[in-house]
Each structure stands twice: as structure tokens, then as C-alpha cells.
Amino acid sequence: MLRLLTIEFYKLRHNRASRVLSIIYFGLLTCIALIAAIKFDIGPIKFHLADAGIFNFPYIWHFNTYMAAILKFFLLLVIVSMMANEYSYKTLKQNLIDGLSKKEFILSKFYTVVVFALFSTIFIFIISLILGLIYSDYTEIGIITSDLQYLLAFFIKLVGFFSFGLFFGILVKRSAFAVGAMVVWLIIENLFRAYLFYNFRGLDNQFEKVSDYMQFLPFESMANLIKEPFSRLGAVRSIANQVGEEFTKSYDVQFTDILIVSIWTFIFIYTSYALLKKRDL
């Protein structure tokens, strides 16, 4: 594994675009800390975002992983361009000539995906821990270590998403087309969602019925891993209670969602290998 990773990171280190995108990605992850500095002073109204509770343990694990997952697009560009460059610069063919098997080639890409996801997860863990220790009202060890499952969900989500990008990178061989294909897939999923809403119109459990079907699709299953955290805030719930609304939403990381995304990840990687094995390079 170490040999395969060494080969991949040697290629990435000598690719300027990949270096720039990686720096932008981790720079933006660091900028999550700047949210703590957001303040609004309008006359007698003073609002400090850090005082709203978003950096309280254990909520911070949920909030930061959700926000960080939005930025995964930058690393996706690194993954798809990494695959596209193999075809553009003929390095794929050269690697195979030098003795690398097609299985090892796919594994080297998958290992790179895992390392990117793992490093991102560790990075978010450190940032969240520092912000929480500075701003959280609760610093008991039991509270700090609760809800760490969001970090696992973040890792699984990135591995699944990057594996999806890797699959399209191998399928279409061009980074721009690979990203475009993912956008088209996302549009198809949303069109299918609209069809389901139309099909189940008039039913009292319409949303549940649609969710039962949508949860098995790639993008939807990844989105389900970390649900939006904003309605979980105490201030939002207080406002909702005042207007007569009540939240019954579950924010937990579900094992079912982890399993579905893991199965899709396996499908993406295995299909990528099958495509590469079938092609005459």
C-alpha cells in the first residue's frame, strides 16, 4: 500500500493544479474558524455568532462536519483531474508497462481517496476541538467525546463522494466531463424525487414515502449521513416553539446510511476496475 501511495503522491506533488486546489480546500476548512469572529452590532442589537452555541460541544462536531462537507468539491477536482491526467500524459500506460497491474492501479487511486478523506477528517477534528475548547460552554470530557460519530460519517461521505468522482473520471477520461456527469446524475436524482412527490401526491406520509425510495440513491444517501444542523440549535427551536411548531427530526448518524454509502463506494471502485480491465490501453 505504501508503495502505491508513494507513486500517487509523487504525481500529485508535481501537478501544480492539484497542489493549488488542495491548498484552497484545506485553507477553506481552516476558514471555518473565522465564523467565530462574525459579529453584528446594529445599535442596541449585538450578535456574536460564537455565542449562538454553534461551537458548543457536542453540537460543534455536527455543525463543522456539515459545513466542511460542502467544500468537498475542491478535492473532487483533484481526484478527477488525477485520473484525467493519467490518460492525457500517458502515465497510466507507462505504469502498466513498468509492471503495475490494473488492480494495483485502481487500488492506488482508492488509497489516495482514503488518505484525502482521512486527513480531512483529522483536520476537522483538530479545528473543532480547538474551537470547542475556546468557545464551548461545556468542556466536560464526556460531553466533548459524545457525537463523534459525525466524524465517522464525514469520513465515509468523503470516501463515497471521491470514489464516485473517480468512477466518472475513468468512465469519461476528462475531468470537466467527469464533474459534468456528476452534475447530470444529481439532476436525475432530483427529477426522480419530483416524480416520486407527484406519484405520492395526496398521501399523508408523502415525505416518508419519497425518503424511503430516495435513500438508496448515491447523492441522497451521502446527504443523509450528516443532516442539516441549523434546526437543531436551541435558538431556532425556541422560535419554532413560539410560533407553534415542533421539531421531531432525528439528527443521528444512521447505520443504514453508512451501509448504503459503503455499498455504493464498493460499486464505484469495483466498476472502475472492471472498466479499466476491459479497456485496451
Image (cartoon, rainbow, N blue to C red):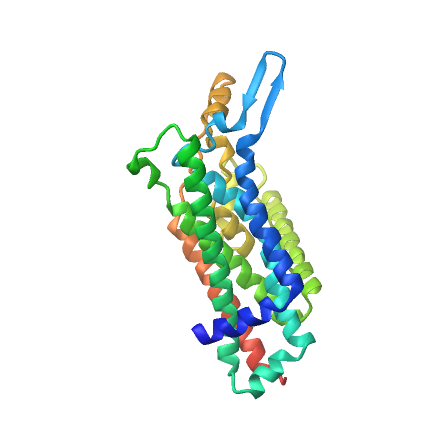
Which picture quadrant has residue 11? bottom right
Q: Quadrant of the C terminus?
A: bottom right
Front one among 159 and 270: 159
Residue 138 image point, x, y percent? 35, 30
Give above or below for 150 relative to 99: above
**Which residue is nearer to you in this view: 169 or 141?**
141
Tell me where residue 8 appears, x and y as whole percent: 54, 71
- Give percent across and percent down for residue 78: 61, 61
Q: Is residue 3 visible?
A: yes
Residue at the spot x=67%, y=57% of the render? 184
Taking 142 as reference, is 108 left or right?
A: right
Counting from the top left corner in percent of width and height, residue 267 is at 50, 67
Image quadrant in which you'd find residue 95: bottom right
Closer to us: 261 or 15: 15
Q: Quick check: 249 above or below 155?
A: above
Residue 178 seen in render: no
**Residue at 64% from the left image edge and 54% from the top image edge:** 188
State which quarter of the image contains the N terminus: bottom left
Camera-side residue of 199 and 227: 227
User: How many labels were placed on the picture?
Assistant: 0
Task: Please give the name of the residue rendered at 54% of the width and 69% of the height, measured from the top-left corner.
Answer: 9
